[in-house]
């Protein structure tokens, strides 16, 4: 699955992992030594994250139900917390990746399925994830 920025029409992450269960969100990026700059983890539903026990800094991107970026917390180091009460999902990127991909508050990011299986999975999810997953060129957004 890919994550793309509508404003720049650039791929932000070509390897996007979804954490949509309580167990997957709790596990997050723990037990990893790094996050590849082309990778990301989306936690949904989610409005806060912590970096307790993490071994590397991350960029944290809070998005609303339509995938619009509400807040970006760059280089959140270990043993920190970030919260945005109005967020519907959180995207965790490698430290520095948000700036490298020119992500800005107000940008809309969306998911692209890399296979028919991923497309079917996205279509079966919650309405807000389907909105984030929709291609704005096709939805008229």
Image: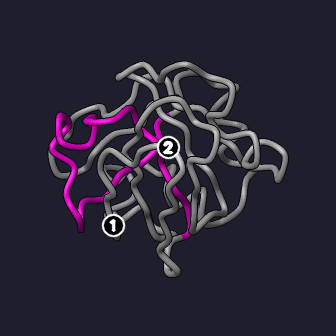
Residue 58: name its quadrant.
top left
Label for residue 98?
A: none
Kindly identify the residue that appears in the image at 26 percent across and 43 percent down.
Answer: 98
From which residue to which does the magenta span run? 88-112
Is disc 2 placed on a helix, strand or loop? loop
Q: Where is residue 61 in the image (x, y as percent from the top left)?
A: 39, 55
Image vertical order of residue 15 relative to residue 109, above or below: above
Q: Quadrant of the C terminus?
A: bottom left
Nearer to us of marks 2 and 1 is: 2
Q: Which residue lies furthest to the right in this view?
A: 23
Task: Out of 62 and 129, give the one closest to the viewer.
Answer: 62
Residue 78, numbered circle: 2
- 101 inside magenta stretch: yes
Q: Position of residue 84 (x, y in %)?
A: 47, 74
Residue nearest the observer in this picture, 64 or 59: 59
Task: Indicate the secondary structure of the residue bearing disc 1.
Answer: strand
Cβ atoms under marks 2 and 1 closer than 8 Å: no
Gap between marks 2 and 1 measured at Cα: 19 Å
Q: Is residue 39 above or below residue 96?
A: above
Using a 10 Å C-alpha cutoff, classify the residue at mark 2 as few (fewer than 14 neighbours), some (14 to 19) or many (20 or more): some
Image location (x, y in percent) of residue 97:
28, 35
Query: What is the quadrant of residue 122 in the picture?
Result: top right
Tell me the crowding category of disc 1: few under 14, some 14 to 19, or many 20 or more residues within 10 angstroms, Cα based.
many
Q: Residue 71 carries which label?
A: 1
**Residue 73 percent location from the top left of the image:** 33, 57
Q: Viewer-proximal residue, 57 or 11?
A: 57
Tell whether 1 sits left or right of 61.
right
Side (left or right) of 30 relative to 113: right
Q: Residue at x 52, y 31 (%)?
A: 16
Say if the magenta span includes residue 56: no
- Mark before the other along the chain sequence, 2 or 1: 1
């Amino acid at each position: 699955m890919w994550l793309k920025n509508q404003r720049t029409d650039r791929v932000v992450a070509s390897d996007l992992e979804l954490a949509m269960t309580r167990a997957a969100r709790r596990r997050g990026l723990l037990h990893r030594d790094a996050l590849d700059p082309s990778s990301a983890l989306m936690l949904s539903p989610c409005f806060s994250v912590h970096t307790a026990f993490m071994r590397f800094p991350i960029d944290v991107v809070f998005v609303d139900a339509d995938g619009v970026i509400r807040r970006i917390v760059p280089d959140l180091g270990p043993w920190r917390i970030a919260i945005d009460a109005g967020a519907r999902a959180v995207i965790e990127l490698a430290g520095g990746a948000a700036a490298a991909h020119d992500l800005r508050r107000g940008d809309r990011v969306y998911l692209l399925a890399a296979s028919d299986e991923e497309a079917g999975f996205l279509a079966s999810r919650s309405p807000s994830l389907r909105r984030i997953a929709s291609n704005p060129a096709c939805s008229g957004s």
